[in-house]
Image (tube, rainbow, N blue to C red):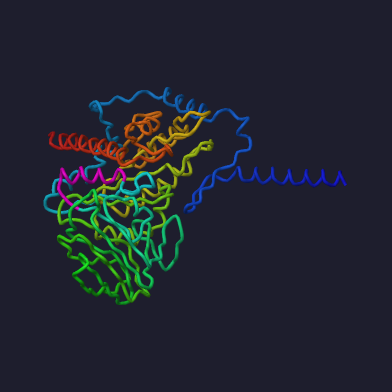
Amino acid sequence: MRDNHLKKSFHWLALVIVLLLLLSFVNEFSLGHFKFKRVDILADIQPDPSRQVAKKDSVKQTNQKPAIRKNPCPPGITCVEDYSEKKDALGKFFKAVTGSKRRPVRVAFFGDSFIEGDILCSSFRDTLQQLFGGQGVGYVPITSEVSQFRTTIQHSFSGWKTYWAVGEKSPFAPLGMSGYCFIPQEENEVEYRPGKKAGGPFHRARLFYTSPLPAQLHYTLDDSLFFEKSLAPSEALQQTVLPCEGAQAIKLRFGPFDSLRLYGISFESNIGMVVDNFAMRGNSGMGLLQTATRELNEFNHFQNYKLILLQYGLNVVSETDTIGYDRYADKMMKVISRLKENFPESSILLLGISDRSYNLNGKFVTMPNILLMRRVQREMARRSRIAFWDVFGAMGGENSMVRFVAANPPLASKDYTHLTYRGGRKLAKKLAEALLYDRIKHDKTKKTP
């Protein structure tokens, strides 16, 4: 009997070891709110990965000859790195900005949970609007995971089915540019009010939808003025403008809703800067490949973006991954290529990964693979011939996230990954300063005979 128990125990132990070995070959991934962490049963006997990656990074840096910089950055500014052939990566955006007093200039800011809730984006938007005109928070989805803590708009909703790039999808719900599609259900409703901190009434709203069959929109302004509007049937993306000058609230209902697909609503003015926040929690950036070329083209027909910012990477790095990020880089190169193809009049700026800390022997320090991802992203920008901005450097480099968390008041949360609104303002200011400095250099270059 004892022998039998020993054999069974041995078999179970062997089975567990085999399963763990198989799981060690599965890379980390996220699916909605679920996150799988890679298993490494040999981690305790392997050398410290932070030393390996740090050594690898330092060796590569020392073998490279230092670049000769003709236009060094002024103190306190982290300059935009221009990898385009003509050193004009942001030229289309800078050219458009000169006409911002006559027409809207739109910016698409893509990212993950680092920018959700309008953290960073709100202060970046405010700065651009103060300099070049414009009002409003730009594009807002129909439903949102972060509606309870976003301060730039008050947002409530009920009666909706949501499909998104890193969650549930359906062939009958093609994803829009934001990576979402919203299907109204019975007794659907969505309401928007100006944010408590943003202040000011609405000026103009544009609603984006598709509907092969006729549909009806019922909307109310300030809980008193009721309007009805027919939505023209169309298989292609359509926009309908909702006059709401001076309104402090707008509530929308839709029906019949059998074929109606909603994407979002943009709050803006007729001139100046419009910055759309396309944050998606859990998105590595590859989620952008889930939106078909047709939908991208249709959105750009109405939006005509002049600048696209990409902030990704935090959902890819991990404490134990030593394989590298070549496959991720290849996928993101495809993302950038698609954006260049579908938004030919847009400048593209890739934001490098921010600092992120982990607990190493009781002390929080920079996660080693942050340095590796930062280098990979810079190389992606170089190969794609677009602009790059070093967020890690702008934060202060190694262990800057620790300093952000320790600041009083805090500039980052105690997950050592995400910024507070105060930290977002600090980083947004640096991003805006980098763009303004690059614009000055750009304009001087263009004026030089």
- The segment highlighted magenta reads 119-135
The answer to which of 166 and 190 lies nearer the viewer is 190
Is 441 contained in the magenta span?
no
**Overall secondary structure of the magenta stretch?**
helix
81, above or below 261, in the image: above
Q: Quadrant of residue 434?
A: top left
Q: Residue 129 lies in magenta, yes or no?
A: yes
Q: Position of residue 185 (x, y in %)?
A: 38, 71
**Residue at (40% x, 29% y) in the render:** 399
Where's residue 334, x and y in %?
40, 49
In the drawing, does residue 36 fall left or right of residue 158? right
Total labels drawn = 0
Q: Nearer the viewer, residue 443 or 262?
A: 262
- Between 126 and 198, the one nearer to me in the picture: 198
Q: Position of residue 31 (x, y in %)?
A: 49, 53
Farthest right residue? 1
The reply, left or right, for residue 231 in relation to residue 48 is: left
The C terminus lies in quadrant = top left
Along the line of sight, the residue nearer the viewer: 246 or 320: 246
With 194 as the anchor, is 392 left or right in this view? right
In percent of width and height, residue 61 lies at 42, 25
